[in-house]
Image: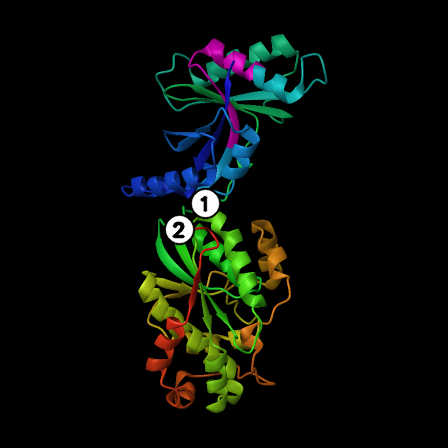
């Protein structure tokens, strides 16, 4: 009998040129991490533009579920693999239909066979193989052929070593495997935006570390608990994630005492970015990632974003800049962070926030306030007292 397997097909990874091998190695490691489980062996074979997962111990459905979390995979395709002969391929097609629809003689369905040869040394052309297999289905099942609008489309792929047959093509995460584009540090709050921004950054190939700024000692630890839970959820896309928790409550009060007034929120954001940049240097991150969405709140006007960005020389990436809130929440639900983001917490951003926030700021406006604090001493002190947590395991 043909054996079950799962095909992982590349998305834009297939368009890479000479450096494609490096991207494929990242994808292979991501697939290995995703399917790793105690006591169960999963074989991963590399083919042209495809990874083939198979296991005698894990059910195919579980392999599919795990594979759908692998960044860089465009299509997840449960399949049967058979010997590389026309007759074996035909038996695999009939077996697949039986497993999916029961024994012949039930409801008649219009069908089509789509065959593709990745290895052109196969003795039949793609069209001849499709006709041969279609004839076998007509004979055994009595189904009518409909090449224009079939109810069942059977996909047959001839590889160098075997033939794969399937009827399902499931959506993968797409994008690039995490780590293939470098390393970034995500400023993670407990809301909807920053976790989604982190996911979008990972999907572009960035391996992410996370930093969460809490309002301690003036707020309770609820926001840290949420950040931990969010990183744990995001960790399934990259593995071995770390969360740095920096308490800035005293620093926020110092900014307020220094007369920040309406500039308080922007001054806090600049301090966070400055501190994150120093942390990025320690962990080897080449960019910062935030969940900013242009115009969503008063601190995210264009001039305020520019003022905050000038607090660092690192690239400050904003994957959600042009997204609206509904789009962000929908994506949070899809990737599994929405439920955690809805939990209540004491957010440091609301601590000491003025009744109204300045919407048009310039860096020189902040210089007087920041000049009253010794930032060169404050930032290292904040990082020295930071906690490092490993929601994804060590």
* The quadrant where residue 368 appears: bottom left
Look at the numbered discs 2 and 1 and tell me whether their residues touch, using CB distance below 8 Å.
Answer: yes
Q: Relative to 172, is 114 above or below?
A: above
In screen coordinates, is 344 left or right of 316?
Answer: right
**Which residue is farthest left?**
18
Which coloring applies here? Answer: rainbow
Image coordinates of residue 328 in percent, x first then y, are 58, 59
Q: Is residue 89 inside the magenta stretch? A: yes
Residue 150 visible? no
Image coordinates of residue 333 in percent, x first then y, are 61, 53
Q: Relative to 253, is 51 above or below?
A: above
Badge 2 is on which residue? Answer: 205
Q: Relative to 388, is 378 above or below?
A: below
Image coordinates of residue 191 in percent, x first then y, are 57, 64
Q: Is residue 288 inside the magenta stretch? A: no
Badge 1 is on which residue? Answer: 71
Q: Residue at x 60, y 61 (%)?
A: 341
Image coordinates of residue 388 in percent, x first then y, are 42, 62
Badge 2 local density, few (<14 within 10 Å), some, or many (20+)? many
Residue segment shown in magenta? 77-94
In screen coordinates, is 387 left or right of 228?
Answer: left
**Which residue is farthest right?**
107
Residue 13 visible? yes
Q: Residue at x 58, y 62 (%)?
A: 192
In screen coordinates, is 120 left or right of 221?
Answer: left
């Amino acid at each position: 009998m043909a054996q079950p397997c799962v095909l992982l097909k590349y998305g834009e990874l297939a368009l890479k040129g000479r450096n494609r091998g490096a991207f494929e190695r990242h994808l292979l490691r991501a697939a290995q991490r995703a399917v790793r489980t105690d006591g169960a062996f999963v074989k991963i074979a590399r083919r042209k533009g495809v990874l083939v997962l198979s296991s005698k111990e894990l059910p195919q459905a579980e392999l599919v579920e795990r594979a759908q979390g692998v960044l860089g995979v465009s299509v997840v395709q449960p399949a049967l693999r058979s010997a590389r002969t026309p007759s074996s391929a035909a038996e695999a097609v009939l077996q697949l239909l039986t497993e999916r629809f029961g024994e012949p003689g039930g409801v008649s369905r219009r069908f089509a066979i789509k065959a593709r040869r990745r290895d052109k040394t196969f003795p039949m052309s793609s069209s001849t193989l499709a006709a041969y297999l279609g004839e076998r289905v007509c004979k055994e099942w009595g189904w009518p052929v409909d090449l224009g609008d079939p109810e069942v489309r059977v996909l047959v792929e001839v590889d160098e070593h075997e033939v794969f047959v399937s009827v399902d093509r499931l959506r993968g995460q797409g994008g690039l495997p995490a780590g293939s584009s470098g390393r970034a540090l995500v400023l993670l709050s407990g809301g909807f935006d920053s976790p989604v921004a982190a996911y979008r950054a990972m999907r572009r190939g960035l391996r992410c570390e996370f930093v969460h700024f809490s309002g301690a000692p003036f707020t309770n630890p609820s926001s840290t608990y949420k950040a931990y839970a969010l990183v744990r959820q995001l960790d399934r896309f990259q593995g071995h994630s770390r969360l740095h928790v920096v308490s800035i409550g005293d620093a926020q009060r110092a900014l307020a005492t220094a007369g920040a007034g309406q500039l308080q929120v922007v001054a806090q954001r600049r301090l966070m970015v400055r501190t994150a940049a120093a942390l990025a240097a320690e962990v080897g991150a080449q960019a910062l990632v935030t969940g900013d969405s242009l115009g969503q709140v008063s601190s995210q006007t264009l001039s305020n974003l520019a003022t905050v960005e000038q607090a660092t020389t690192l690239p400050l990436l904003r994957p959600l800049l042009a997204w609206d809130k509904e789009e962000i929440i929908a994506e949070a639900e899809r990737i599994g962070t929405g439920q955690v983001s809805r939990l209540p917490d004491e957010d440091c951003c609301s601590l000491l926030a003025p009744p109204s926030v300045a919407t048009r700021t310039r860096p020189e406006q902040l210089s007087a306030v920041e000049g009253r604090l010794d930032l060169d001493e404050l930032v290292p002190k904040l990082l020295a007292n930071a906690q490092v947590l490993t929601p994804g395991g060590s």
